[in-house]
Image (cartoon, grey):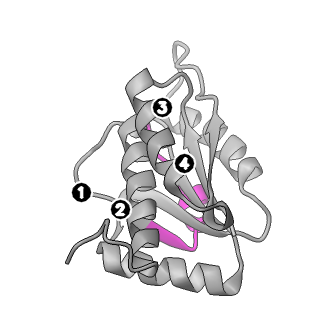
Amino acid sequence: MKLHIIAVGQKMPDWISAGFDEYAKRMPRETSINLIELKPEKRASGKTGEQIKTAERDRILAAIPRDSTVWALDERGEQLTTLALATHLREWQGAGRDTCFIIGGADGLHDDVKVRGDKLFSLSRLTLPHGMVRVLLAEQLYRAWSVTQNHPYHRE
């Protein structure tokens, strides 16, 4: 089973890449994190936020691995505890299905992407920099995995 993170945005600062890579490398091979970076739509003159989201929608939907569970990240999505995320991780591992997390661009996700998702998920009600969301999500996936392994990284 793989955990895919589809993220609109490329050329992240070094500290974002280093933070993401740190948590991704901690994951075991059988539950690896795969980052799929998508080129954001150019903010050309006259393009509305809706037009930009529509163009990014098509790239996102094309990048979703076949037969995977899809969680779209949105600040209005459901917030979970780390233990609840660990429960979902156990379920995904038991089913052997890949899971895909989608992080939108600066204008957010198109409604079609949100509808395609099996769950609308929020890391926080705060508006976060999209690069930082990658790091936070990777850390939480590692933390959830550590819970499933009774690893001391997570403490209750």
Report if the CB atoms under discs 2 and 1 are less than 8 Å apart.
Answer: yes
Cα distance between the residues tagged 4 and 3: 12 Å
Q: Is residue 58 above or below residue 123?
A: above
* Sequence-earlier tag: 3 or 2: 3
**Which residue in the rendered view is the most extreme toward the front?**
152
Cα distance between the residues tagged 1 and 3: 24 Å
User: Is 31 included in the stretch rendered in magenta?
Assistant: no
Q: Nearer the viewer, residue 143 or 40?
A: 143
Image coordinates of residue 135 in percent, x first then y, are 40, 44
Cα distance between the residues tagged 2 and 1: 7 Å
Q: As drawn, is 67 to the left or to the right of 136?
A: right
Cα distance between the residues tagged 3 and 2: 21 Å
Q: Quadrant of the N terminus?
A: bottom right
Mark 4: give few (<14), some (14-19) or many (20+) Cα within 10 Å. few
**Residue found 50% across the figure and 72% down from its top:** 119
Cα distance between the residues tagged 4 and 1: 28 Å
Frontmost of labels 1 and 3 is 3
Locate residue 47: give its quadrant.
top right
Where does label 3 land, which residue? 17
Q: Which mark is residue 25?
A: 4
Mark 3: give few (<14), some (14-19) or many (20+) Cα within 10 Å. some
Q: Amino acid at mark 1?
A: Arg
Q: The magenta stretch spans which residues?
A: 107-120
Report if the CB atoms under discs 1 and 3 are less than 8 Å apart.
Answer: no
* Sequence-earlier tag: 4 or 3: 3
**Residue found 41% across the figure and 75% down from its top:** 85
Where does label 1 land, which residue? 125
Number of on-image labels: 4
Q: Amino acid at mark 4?
A: Lys
**Residue found 44% across the figure and 84% down from its top:** 87
Where does label 2 land, which residue? 122
